[in-house]
Image (cartoon, rainbow, N blue to C red):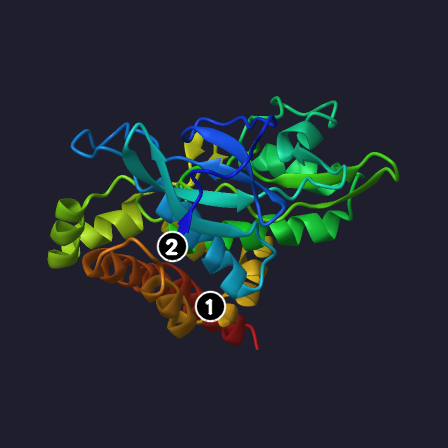
Amino acid sequence: MIDFTNLPVRKKTYAGANGSKISVLYNDELYMLKFPAVPTINKEMSYANGCISEYLGCHVFESIGIPVQTTLLGTYTINGKQKIVVACKDFTMDGLVLQDFASLKNTIIDSAHNGYGTELSDIVKTLEEQSAIDPQLLIEWFWDMFIVDAFIGNWDRHNGNWGFLYAPKTDKITLAPIHDSASCLYPQADEEMMQKILADPAEREIRIYDRPLSGIKKNGQKIQYFKFISSLENDDCNKALKRILPKINMNEINKIIDETPFISDLQKNFYKTMLCERKEKILDFSYQKLQKREQSLF
């Protein structure tokens, strides 16, 4: 249990709408401390579970072998009230500058939409035509991220919360670690809702097949993860599915959840159940369908 309350506070500030944030020094390293946001949908909750979602989402990415921001869970007491917070290690130390994908998208002069437009065809055009980083590397990174986001149910991966690290002195650009995953794993589900979902297969299926939707759009509509991935219509997405699925170790992920502080046994059961079913019904199903299609060609 880490108490972040009395750590030195730095003057660096952070943008974003998902809760309040301050900069602190922990073990002589800079961390962004994120506080739980007030829920916008489930008004019965005092605070959303975004800090838990951020922590778990990042650790799931890490377990799959994708570079990710270091996250720690702890507490912070303000006005006599103790809050559960997530500390996210600042990877822009040593003079690196975080540049989001939206800013890279803005360099494509004949793009149909601005940098924050999330139409898939426009994003793919940027992935292929940009010259800051190897296009094939960027294409694979985007679709690997998409598959894991489908697995963890991230509804808010947009062009402003993934990107690159730019070194001004050398003019080099590299992929930034995965960060800002607070919108995965149903952050506005309280324990009453979790119990309801666990008890009713129909409720689970709604939250697997119908929602959450991706933050990426196709023809102006947010992408439904199951429908899009299982359609096998995008070859780069299919390749990412084949890369990522074998790396998902549910025993390891369940261990991460079991060892996560502050959450109840009900919450642990909920997260493990939903991840297991999302893997089976979205990723496993699509992978098996893809294998059958490929076998039929020979």
Disc 2 residue type? Met
Element at badge 1? loop
Q: Is residue 281 left or right of residue 288?
A: left
**Which quarter of the rendering shows the N terminus?**
bottom left
Spot the residue most to the front.
Answer: 6
On residue 236, the disc is: none
Q: Camera-side residue: 54 or 142?
A: 54
Q: Residue at x 41, y 62 (%)?
A: 283
Q: Is residue 274 left or right of residue 183?
A: left
Give above or below for 128 relative to 58.
above
Provide the residue designation for mark 2.
1
Determine crowd level at label 1: few under 14, some 14-19, many 20+ residues with C-alpha closer than 10 A.
Answer: some
Element at badge 2? loop
Determine crowd level at label 2: few under 14, some 14-19, many 20+ residues with C-alpha closer than 10 A.
Answer: few
Provide the residue designation for mark 1.
248
Give above or below for 223 relative to 147.
above
Q: Is residue 30 left or right of residue 78?
A: right
Q: Residue at x 64, y 39 (%)?
A: 163
Q: Residue 165 location, x and y as percent?
A: 71, 41
Q: Residue at x 54, y 26 (%)?
A: 15
Give above or below for 287 relative to 141.
below
Q: Nearer the viewer, mark 1 or mark 2?
A: 2
